[in-house]
Amino acid sequence: MRLYFANNDQFIKEGYIINSLVRMGRFLVILLVLTGCSNLEGNNSIKIKNENNNSISISYEEEKPPALKLTIGEVEIKTYRGTYSWSYLGKRKGEIVAVEAEHAPPTEMVNIEQCISVNLMEPIKLDFEKEPTKYEVRLWDNNNVIKTYNSFEEVIEKGKYIFEIVGYWEDNRATYVVALDIK
């Protein structure tokens, strides 16, 4: 359907107003979308309620647990990531992705006979890419966990052991393994 106006100038003015309103509407939609997205990216996490009505924090960015760099004195010691339970918000669809990654037990991940000699009296630094809310240190012999500590500074045993470091981030958990000979 076409509108005809008596005055050609009036037709041009009406078309300009309609065109301006359409552009303004598009601008507002884009602005709302960008505002909503920027709020998501600014937080880096959301809290949701699970089936037990407990609050769970989900990260937007990390699809895998952070790496861990262990330094004792001047020696940087390689750690190996083991089992983990990790949730994150998918980037494409915004869905929650939960990953349960099983790994061989610590006794099969590292060889206790190829351990690195260290002195726990020297400064110990656990440098996680993202700091956990807490961590614990489990001491393994050749077969089983023999002791659990809240930090390396609490360890009193001497000799060859496998250390399993368990980091906790809200509802996420990851393990890291290394073999050490404590002097």
Image: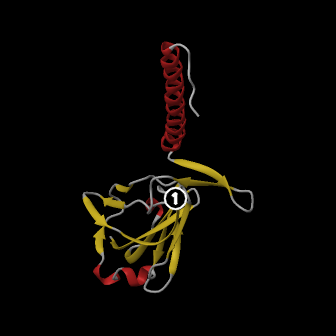
Q: Nearer the viewer, residue 96 or 175?
A: 96
Badge 1 amino acid: Tyr
The residue under label 1 is 88
Name the quadrant of the C terminus.
bottom left
Apparent side of residue 163 relative to residue 172 in the rendered image (left or right): left
Quadrant housing residue 36? top right
Name the quadrant of the N terminus.
top right
Q: Which SS class for mark 1?
A: strand
Who's the residue at 41% across and 59% down the image?
66
Who's the residue at 37% across and 61% down the image?
68
Number of residues whose C-alpha sits closer than 10 Å to that of mark 1, classed few (under 14), some (14–19) or many (20 or more): many
Residue 164: % across, % down = 45, 71
Quadrant housing residue 124? bottom left
Residue 121: % across, % down = 35, 59
Who's the residue at 69% across and 60% down the image?
50
Its colouring scheme is secondary structure
Q: Nearer the viewer, residue 146 or 156?
A: 146
Count the marks.
1
Relative to 14, does residue 160 appear above or below in the rendering? below
Q: Nearer the viewer, residue 77 or 122?
A: 77
Relative to 160, does residue 136 appear above or below in the rendering? above
Quadrant housing residue 79? bottom left
Instruction: Spot the residue most to the left.
Output: 74
Apparent side of residue 36 relative to residue 155 in the rendered image (left or right): right
Apparent side of residue 90 relative to residue 160 in the rendered image (left or right): right
Instruction: Spot the residue most to the bottom.
Output: 143
Q: Nearer the viewer, residue 118 or 103?
A: 103
Who's the residue at 43% across and 85% down the image?
142
Residue 20: % across, % down = 50, 24
